[in-house]
Structures are given as C-alpha cells and as structure tokens.
Image (cartoon, rainbow, N blue to C red):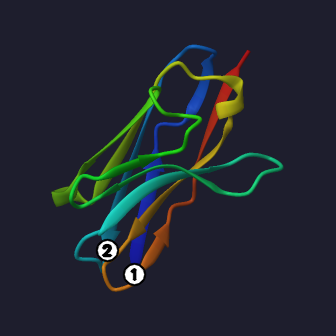
Amino acid sequence: QVRVVESGGGLVQTGGSLRLSCTASGRITSCYAMGWYRQGPENERDMVARISTDRTTNYADSVKDRFTISSNRARNSVYLQMNYLKPEDTAIYYCRCQTSIGGNYWGQGTQVTVSS
C-alpha cells in the first residue's frame, strides 16, 4: 500500500506565500516524478508543477516566476514554494507520485485559499 500525504495549505492574503509539502511512503521504492496539481470548484485538475528524478521541472504558465518546486528524492518528498499568491490560485492542491513501472499515486489534497 502506498500513502501520499500533503500538508501546508491554508488561508493567505493576496501577495502572500505558502509552502506545500508532500511525502510518499509505503510499498514504493521511489517516485520517478512527483508533481503538484490543483482543482478549483468548477475546473478540471491541472498540473501546477512537476519535477523528475533528473531535476527537470515543468510549470504551468500561470505560476512561472512565482512558484518553485523542489524535491528530496531520498525521502520521496516534494515541496512547492508559492509566492505572490493571487485569488485565482485558490484550489485544492494534490500531490502525485509516478513510478517508473507505471504506478500513479495521489494524495487527498490540501486546500489553498487566497483572499483578495
């Protein structure tokens, strides 16, 4: 069994910062890639940022220059530093672990709310 647990969400004012953390544990050797996705009340779940084992990163255009993804591969952990937050960043943020053999694991999500 694999568990993916996020933390760090909360309520922040426009222009503020939050740092999300995520760790995958259990019957898993390592995550080939880890990423953050978000889903608003009326939206689909979209990629925010993703990082692979070779440290290659990808960001959604809407968060470039504001969000930074990092990881600790030994701990199967990934982090998302979010700066200059905007109301449109309000969503449930989900962590995803992808394994090299096709495994795909999601966390339960953490709520981020940005007030105007």
Q: Secondary structure at mark 2?
A: strand
Residue 52 image position (x, y, % from top left): 30, 59
Q: Residues within 10 Å of mark 2 (few under 14, many from 20)?
A: few
| Picture layout, residue 115 above or below residue 40 | above
Residue 55 image position (x, y, % from top left): 24, 52
Q: Which residue is mark 1?
A: 1
Tell me what residue is drawn at x 55 percent, y 39 percent.
61
What amino acid type is highlighted by mark number 2?
Answer: Gly
Left/right placement of residue 26 relative to residue 103 reads: left
Q: Secondary structure at mark 1?
A: loop
Which quarter of the picture shows residue 34?
A: bottom left
Tell me what residue is drawn at x 53 percent, y 34 percent.
63
Residue 89 disc label: none
Residue 98 image position (x, y, % from top left): 39, 71
What amino acid type is highlighted by mark number 1?
Answer: Gln
Residue 26 disc label: 2
| Picture layout, residue 25 above or below residue 46 | below
Left/right placement of residue 32 relative to residue 83 reads: left
Residue that lies at the very extreme toward the right in this rendered image: 42
Contact, mark 1 vs mark 2 (Cβ under 8 Å): yes
Which sits earlier in the primary sequence, circle 1 or circle 2? 1
Q: Nearer the viewer, residue 106 or 53?
A: 53
Which quarter of the picture shows residue 29?
A: bottom left
Residue that lies at the very extreme toward the front in this rendered image: 61
Q: Nearer the viewer, residue 104 or 62?
A: 62
Image quadrant holding the C terminus, namely top right
